[in-house]
Image (spheres, rainbow, N blue to C red):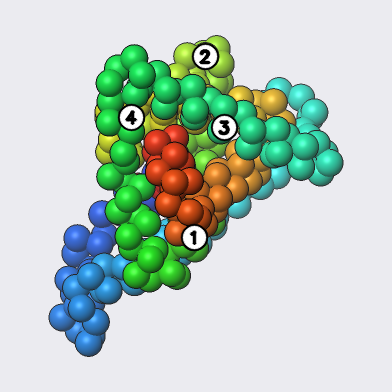
C-alpha cells in the first residue's frame, strides 16, 4: 500500500477521535456549551480531515487502479449513479428484512438516531452527513481498502473484506449485514465505472435523502425509513 494511503487512514482515525480531546478544550476556551462544542468541533475536524485527505490523494486524481482505460464517461457516470441509488435501496431493504424477519434484530439504529438528533439541534451538521462523510468513506473504504485488496484477490473476497471493515467502523455489529450490503453495492459501482465519483455520488444521495426525510418527512415515513437506512449515515 502506498505510504500516502496510510497517511489518509491515519488522518481519518485522528479526525474521528480528536473530539475526545479538543471538544472539551473548546468548551473551556469559549462560551459554547459542551454539546455545542462537540458538534462544532466535529464539523471543523471533518472539514479539516477532508482537506488533508484530498491533498494527500492528489497523485491519484490522474491514476486508475484498474487495468485499461475504459472509465465511464460523464453520461455513464450519471446513469450509473441513478442506477446505483436504486440498487443501494433494494439491497438495503433486502438486508434489513433478513435482519428483522429472520434474525430478529431490532431495526432501530442508534447511530442514525444520534446523528439526526445532532442535525436537528445544529442544522450545519447536515454538511457532514450529506457531503463530507460520503467523500471520506468512499476514498478510504472503496478507493484505498477495496482498491488495494482488489489488486490481489477476486471481487467478491475484496468486496466482502472491505464491506466488513466498513460495517465494523460504524460501531453497530448487529447491523453488519446492512452495512456490508451497501459496501458491496459501492464496490460494484466503483469496479463497473472505474470512477470513485460514482459511489461517492450514490453515498451522498443516500445520506441526503435519509437526512431530509427523517428531519422533514411524515412520522410514518420516518419510522419505515429508519428500519432500512442504518448504513446510510457516517458514524
Q: Which mark is residue 88?
A: 3
Of marks 4 and 3, which one's residue comes earlier in the chain? 3
Tell me what residue is drawn at x 56 percent, y 20 percent: 151
Tell me what residue is drawn at x 38 percent, y 71 percent: 122
Picture coordinates of residue 29 (x, y %)? 20, 84
Looking at the image, residue 16 sits to the left or right of residue 217; the answer is left
Q: Which residue is mark 4?
A: 175
Count neighbours of disc 1 (C-alpha within 10 A) and say few if under 14, some if 14 to 19, many if 20 or more.
Answer: few
Task: Establish if 105 lies above or below 39.
Answer: above
Looking at the image, residue 102 sits to the left or right of residue 76; the answer is left
Q: Which mark is residue 156?
A: 2
Picture coordinates of residue 84 (x, y %)? 65, 33
Looking at the image, residue 15 sits to the left or right of residue 73; the answer is left
Q: Which residue is mark 1?
A: 216
Q: Secondary structure at mark 1?
A: helix
Q: Secondary structure at mark 2?
A: helix
Tell me what residue is drawn at x 36 percent, y 19 percent: 101
Label 1 close to label 2 by CB (< 8 Å): no
Cα separation, mark 4 vs mark 3, equals 15 Å
Tell me what residue is drawn at x 20 percent, y 78 percent: 33
Amino acid at each position: 500500500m502506498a505510504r500516502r494511503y496510510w497517511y489518509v487512514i491515519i488522518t481519518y482515525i485522528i479526525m474521528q477521535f480528536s473530539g475526545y480531546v479538543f471538544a472539551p478544550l473548546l468548551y473551556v476556551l469559549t462560551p459554547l456549551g459542551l454539546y455545542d462544542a462537540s458538534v462544532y468541533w466535529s464539523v471543523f475536524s471533518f472539514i479539516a480531515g477532508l482537506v488533508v485527505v484530498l491533498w494527500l490523494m492528489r497523485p491519484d486524481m490522474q491514476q486508475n487502479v484498474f487495468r485499461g482505460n475504459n472509465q465511464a464517461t460523464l453520461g455513464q457516470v450519471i446513469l450509473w449513479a441513478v442506477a446505483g441509488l436504486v440498487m443501494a435501496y433494494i439491497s438495503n431493504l433486502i438486508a434489513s428484512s433478513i435482519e428483522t424477519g429472520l434474525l430478529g434484530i431490532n431495526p432501530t439504529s442508534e447511530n442514525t438516531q444520534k446523528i439526526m438528533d445532532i442535525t436537528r439541534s445544529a442544522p450545519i451538521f447536515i454538511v457532514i452527513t450529506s457531503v463530507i462523510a460520503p467523500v471520506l468513506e468512499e476514498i478510504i473504504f472503496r478507493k484505498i481498502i477495496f482498491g488495494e485488496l482488489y489488486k490481489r484477490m477476486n471481487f467478491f473476497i475484496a468486496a466482502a473484506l472491505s464491506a466488513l471493515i466498513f460495517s465494523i467502523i460504524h460501531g453497530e455489529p448487529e447491523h453488519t449485514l446492512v452495512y456490508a450490503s451497501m459496501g458491496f453495492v459501492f464496490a460494484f459501482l466503483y469496479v463497473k465505472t472505474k470512477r470513485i465519483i460514482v459511489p461517492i455520488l450514490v453515498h451522498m444521495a443516500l445520506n441526503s435523502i435519509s437526512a431530509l426525510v427523517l428531519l422533514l418527512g411524515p412520522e410514518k415515513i420516518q419510522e419505515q425509513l429508519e428500519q432500512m437506512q442504518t448504513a446510510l449515515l457516517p458514524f
